[in-house]
Amino acid sequence: MGQKAVILELDVGNSRIKWRRMSADRSETLSRGINLDEDEFFVEQGNYGVPSRFLMGSVADKRLTKRISKWSETQWSISPLEAQVRRVCGGVKINYADVTRLGVDRWLAMLGAFERSKGPCIVIDSGTAFTLDILNEDGMHLGGYILPGLWLMKESLTCKTGIRLEAKTLEPCLDLGNSTDEAVVNGGLAALVALIEKKMEELSKSGCDPKVYLTGGDADFFVRQMDFPALELDMDLVLDGLRIACVALGDSR
């Protein structure tokens, strides 16, 4: 019996590599993981067979992307199909004058979200950076925000001021801080939650009832602190968008 056909999907971010292996018909997730660097990814993938297809979306340094591609070509004799931002794809329309200036991770998350919502939505990716993008009912990208993520907010304060945090790990919440550590960590979350709530309120006042999708390493913090029926945590938005993008690029096998 021949080897089972497998699709490897890879999301290469600023601080980690997220991947999953899917059955050829995408009806089943066979395995998934998160690696902190490419060497860890290479070692882990050595435990699995050669994929029939390899799809990749990357916002990392081009040298890293090229290294992953070279490794794949050497070890598996296949080259990854890398997603590139397109002005129109999967019902999503990008309004940037230069679409290449839009991060592919933001774009892929929007593709994944719009496939689910089929209507207006707010797409939030909270990782090293915090991004918020808005799509209208027609899939038009109305614009977005890029801010430091929770970790970067904390780091900027400790690096650029005299503030020194004592707690190594402290889960953020919306309570007022009763220590410098709590004030810094909770303040970052409060600022980002306020932005989300403001955009939701603005859209609601305009007669729009958007769904809100959250993804990224810190997304769970927001879900635990926000109580909105339209709020949905989806950690696979980018990888699902990768599938849509690569089909549009001609990978319809």
Image (cartoon, rainbow, N blue to C red):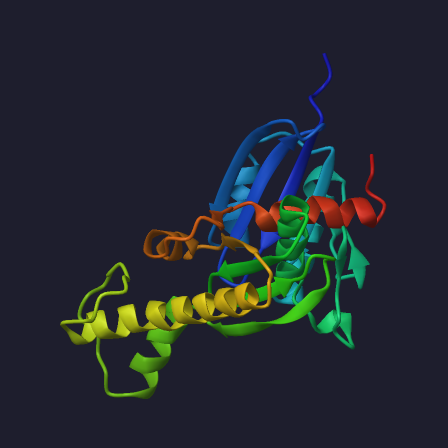
- Locate residue 84: give its quadrant: bottom right
**Percent from the top left, x then y, of residue 65?**
66, 59
Q: Name the residue: 56% across, 73% down.
A: 145
Q: Position of residue 117 (x, y in %)?
A: 63, 48
- Left or right: where does residue 61 sit relative to residue 32? right
| Quadrant in the picture for the N terminus | top right
Q: Find the residue positioned furthest to the left.
A: 178
Residue 20 appears in the figure: yes
The answer, for residue 80, to whether it is visible in the render is no
Q: Is residue 11 above or below residue 20?
A: below
What is the count of numbered marks? 0
Residue 17 position (above or below residue 53)? below
**Residue 207 % position (x, y):** 60, 63
Q: Which residue appears at 71% of the width and 27% of the height?
A: 25
Q: Residue at x 27, y 65 (%)?
A: 174
**Relative to residue 185, is residue 59 drawn left or right?**
right
Q: Nearer the viewer, residue 246 or 210?
A: 210
Residue 189, given in percent of the width and then of the height, sits at 35, 67
Find the residue positioned furthest to the bottom: 161
